[in-house]
Image (tube, rainbow, N blue to C red):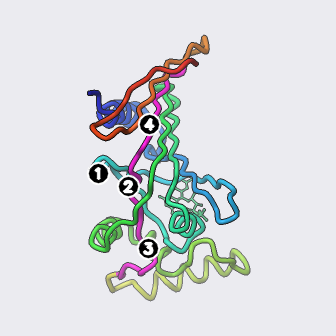
Amino acid sequence: MENPFKKFEDWYSTHRKVTKASLSGACCFTTIGKDGYPNSRFVSLKEIKSEAFVITGSLQSRKGLDVIHTPKVSLTFWWSETKKQVRVQGIAKELSEVESLEYFSNRSRESKVVSTVFEQGKEIKSFDELTTRFEEGLQKYESQELVKPQRWSGFYVKPIRMEFMEFKKTRLHKRIHFHKVQEGWEKTYLQP
Ligand SMILES: Cc1cc2nc3c(=O)[nH]c(=O)nc-3n(C[C@H](O)[C@H](O)[C@H](O)COP(=O)(O)O)c2cc1C
């Protein structure tokens, strides 16, 4: 039985080889808010681990609160150089403390300072305040290791469906759909 992760890794590694985009792991992450509205934003795919997509960020951000309320999420990739789209629907599960510590330790110093000094999504009075607080943070933590804030973590997105589309100029797009079943994945082809 064909495994969609093999296909994802083939397509993703080709994309990463050929793309000129600086954030080659960017993908659109959609959550469902408490009010029932979907909400999308770009995030960076960290890696694929145990057949799940790993993303990181603050659990107290809008996306974090949405996921905790409704773990049904989606991820969408568009790779313009290879003209391929991948759509993923699945269930998000919080990373363990050990895993989030590891992802945090791999962040740049600036990113660590930002995640420590700011509460993602909370209101701020002005952009001046933003710069001042960032510079104060850089100074404060100049000679000490930054500790991961409790709220900073991430999610595993475990897919239940994955769709691979090869975009064609003729609009005869090739679409392959995988649906998770007990023993593996059911594969179907979809009309463009
Ligand atoms: C290319 C790109 C990659 C991003 N990667 C992340 C990420 O990995 N984690 C994150 O929390 N925000 C990331 N952001 C910022 C998010 O788009 C968003 O502004 C932030 O997560 C707050 O969203 P929320 O208020 O819905 O939680 C990224 C933005 C862009 C444009």
- Mark-to-mark CA distance, 2 and 1: 7 Å
Q: Residue at x 51, y 25 (%)?
A: 83
Q: Quadrant of residue 128?
A: bottom right
Per the image, the residue denoted by label 2 is: 54
- Mark-to-mark CA distance, 1 and 3: 19 Å
Determine whether label 2 and label 3 are within 8 Å by CB: no
Q: Does the Cβ of the disc 3 residue fall within 8 Å of ligand 1?
A: no
Q: Is residue 2 magenta?
A: no
Determine whether label 1 and label 4 are within 8 Å by CB: no
Q: Is residue 152 magenta?
A: yes
Q: Pick the quarter of the image with the N terminus.
A: top left
Q: Residue at x 27, y 72 (%)?
A: 98
Counting residues from the start of the chain, the first of labels 2 and 3 encountered is 2
Q: Is residue 42 left or right of residue 184?
A: right
Q: Position of residue 180 (x, y in %)?
A: 38, 39
Q: Does the Cβ of the disc 1 residue fall within 8 Å of ligand 1?
A: no
The residue at the far bottom in this view is: 140
Chief secondary structure of the magenta span?
strand
Query: What residue range appears in magenta?
Result: 146-167
- Mark-to-mark CA distance, 2 and 3: 14 Å
Q: Is residue 34 above or below residue 156?
A: below
Per the image, the residue denoted by label 3 is: 152
Q: Is residue 185 above or below residue 128?
A: above
Per the image, the residue denoted by label 1 is: 49
Determine which of the numbered discs, if any, sits on residue 162 in the image.
Answer: 4
